[in-house]
Amino acid sequence: MQEADVQEHIEMAELGMDHALEHLQKELVHVSAGKASPVMLDGLMVDYYGTPTPVKQVANISTADARSLVIQPWEKSMLSAIERAIFEANLGFTPMNDGEVVRINIPHMTEERRKDLVKKVKQYGEDAKVSVRSARHKAMDGIKKAVKDGYPEDAGKRREEEINNMTQKFYTKIDEIVKVKETDIMTV
């Protein structure tokens, strides 16, 4: 029974580390590298007849070119609500409503803005590492408890080593993801 418990702790740790990696990737999608992408508006909520609704459920979002987004609502009455939601979200760009669609021009990024975004990306990476450490810590505690309850100590040490190796692999993946995003942001 104890082997199954220890294996469960390891699987839960891996699952937690996977979630941390997925969350990091989702967060980095929202960090604009100066190129227009409909994904930039994921998570943007619009007031749709009193109900907060994702903008992609009330409009079609497309890229007109590398520096602009076009948001075409399915109901023209939603134009002002979409425009207001973009202003309130403080995304760093100004929507323009022409009566048919809402256009967003993505401004060229200054060197200072790029550096700020790199800091933000690095912070996301650190947050992911904290989540990985937390998953590692829970698994280690579970293994130590199993050893106290009679699980062989040498087997416990091997399992702890397995957790540490897994943690290092996830740290490496996080560093690689952050480095790629950082390069993307700093490329003019």
Image (cartoon, grey):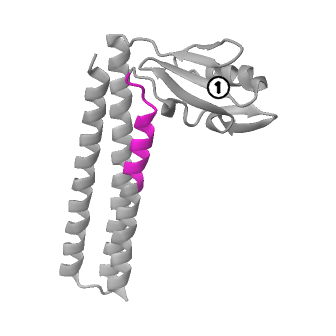
Residue drawn at 42 percent across, 26 percent down: 32
Q: Amino acid at mark 1?
A: Gln
Dividing the picture into quadrants, the one containing residue 95 is top right
Residue drawn at 38 percent across, 37 percent down: 124
Considering only vertical position in the picture, is 164 above or below 28? below
Q: Nearer the viewer, residue 90 or 145?
A: 90
Considering only vertical position in the picture, is 141 above or below 152? above
Give the farthest residue toward the right.
49
Q: Give the x, y percent position of residue 132.
A: 35, 53
Whether residue 170 appears in magenta in the rendering, the answer is: no
Considering only vertical position in the picture, is 2 above or below 41? below
Q: Nearer the viewer, residue 118 or 42?
A: 42
Q: Disc 1 designates what residue?
A: 72
Residue drawn at 57 percent across, 13 percent down: 94
Q: Looking at the magenta stretch, what is its main secondary structure? A: helix
Q: Quadrant of the N terminus?
A: bottom left
Q: Which residues are magenta?
A: 19-33
Q: Quadrant of the C terminus?
A: top left
Give the farthest residue toward the bottom.
1
Considering only vertical position in the picture, is 181 above or below 110? below
